[in-house]
Image (tube, rainbow, N blue to C red):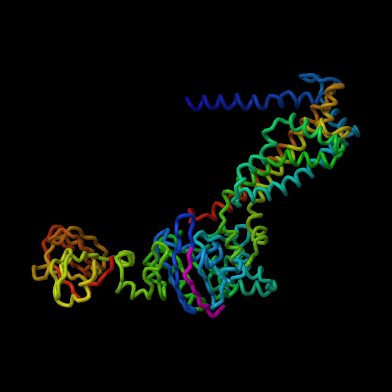
Amino acid sequence: MTRAVLTAYFVLVASFLLLPLFFLVPISLTDSQFLEFPPKSLSLRWYREFFVDQSWVDATLASLKIGVGATILSLLFGTLASVALVRADFRAKGLLTAIFIAPLIIPSVVIALALYIVFLRWQLVNNIYALTLVHALIALPYVVMIVSGSLRRYDMTIERAARVLGAGPTRAFLYTTLPYLMPAMFASAILAFFASFDELIITLFISGGLQTLPVRIWNDLSLKLDPTVPAVAVMLTLLSIVGMTVGEIVRRRNERRYQSNSVSEA
Amino acid sequence: MSSTGATIDFRSVRKTYGKFVALESFSMHVKRGEFMTLLGASGSGKTTALNALAGFTEIDSGEILIDGVPITRLPTEKRDIGMVFQSYSLFPHRNVIRNISFPLEMRGVPRAEARRRSEKALQMVRLDALANRMPHELSGGQKQRVAFARAVVFEPRVLLMDEPLGALDLKLRETLQLEIKDYQRQIGCTVIYVTHDQGEALTLSDRLAVMDKGQVLQIGPPEELYDKPQSRFVAEFVGANNILKVEGAEPGSVMLEGLGRVSGHVAHLIAASFASIRPELIQIRREASGAHRATLAEAVFFGNSVRYVLRAADGKEISAIEPRRPGQDVLPLGTPISFDLNVADLVALKG
């Protein structure tokens, strides 16, 4: 009885979450000029349209560049920050942790407006490097949360063992802790990348003429509406699923190594 | 693989964590090639002493010397110490042979030579067949053997072991005890071994130091600590023992809990507050011929011996171990018996 109720509940919630896809996929496969559901005839026409239209390709490339840059930056600073936040003992630790997580909590519009005012003065609007830096800031909380969570569960004696056996602090970290953090960094890299790849509001304020993929979609929606947008949306969804799956596989493989290395199993 | 062990000196080392005093005027000299065990309960300071020597904890005052050279200012990696941990602490991303060659790699030993020396170390612990396994594919005993090989492959003059057998089951622990002792004899390094298991300490050590509240209570060879404990704490902590309160003393005799008035060679007991006697030094008499009366309160059968708990006339429980011959029956509970002991075997204890 309980099982049946839970199953029904699961199906309900899962369908609600998957509902957009249920409409999106057929709409993207239409042969018509307009959004229609269900489509009268099927074709990959709008997928082709995406790759042929230079403005779509440019927007995608811009998003990719910014996303990769933001991921690398947030990963570097986020991991270093995590090491300090987890291991060092200092007064401002709580406050500093809050500051690192803040971009996730403060409404995007507030950040967008603040950055817009500053960027106007410093003439950084329509600058791809400045935009990358801002995206790194938005991605940072994901890295800090995931990496510091993983670091908190780390058995420090492995790093100690490396130290006593002859590795200096840096080498001990690189040889023992870093490999341990890899899966967490990989998982947070995926989240960081999509945080940047998805970002619309802040980008709209400070990108100037620069079009990222979400901005391009936004512009498309407000001007005309053709089935390229659903086609792009479906491709983005598939990309996310692949990314998340790879991340999960890497995480599980690594977990096994550390579990069987713990004392309790002996 | 061989090295000459170094001497180790702790000179009035003090270490506090907030209000908790982990080590207080802790001094100890360890001889070249000696197997020294720090024995104590958790919180006794034994691990703090080890961590201070390894460089994981900074001490508040005092000095630690290896071969007469002060090392408290040297970073961990420059102290040239081998160490084995309770949690094995193998590097999960490296296979067995690359775990063992790690210390050599860190010291810039050429690859081929590092490989050769690591293989030799692996041979010593008889795991040559597992060179390419990953740590998570090994059993607990195998992991600890690899950890041991890794700790000695660079021929350190000092080897530290922090409860290395604590996570293993009893049988494996006994096998590895013998192995460790054997390897140490081959290698010749000085070992400091930390444990709370007194049996392990008695089996392995050349000398052992019983620690409590950050200080050494007594230090000496295992036989000496077993035969002549100086304090009640050591008498109770090392081996099974009977602790008898000294209830009164006059020249020529003392009043002891459980025994009543005892005379003869008791001069050494007159100033003591407690006396101890090992269970195996008490002879049970099946008739009433012994000097002290008691009833049997408990009997535990061990095969080659029986441990009896005797209830003396004043109610004090005294345990006695009687070696057993085949066919000999275990006495039934409640049997009135008597027992004897040699007064010279009573050890005088401070409070």
Is residue A173 rendered to the left or right of residue B310?
right
Residue B31: say if magenta: no
Instruction: Specify the quadrant that holds the N terminus of chain B.
Output: bottom right
Task: Choose top left, top right, bottom left or bottom right for residue A155.
Answer: bottom right
Query: Where residue B38 sits: x, y (%)?
Result: 43, 68
Left or right, A183 with reference to A123: left
Judge whether A145 appears above or below B115 on screen. above
* Quadrant in which residue B195 is drawn: bottom left
x and y, in percent, of residue A97 in the image: 63, 42
Q: Position of residue B212 (x, y in %)?
A: 39, 63
Determine whether, in the image, residue A52 is placed left or right of residue A253: right
For the C terminus of chain B, the image quarter is: bottom left
- Count the labels in the image: 0
B46 is higher (above) or lower (below) than A186: below
- In front: A10, or A192? A192
User: Which region of the structure is painted magenta?
Assistant: B1-14
Q: Is residue B2 magenta?
A: yes
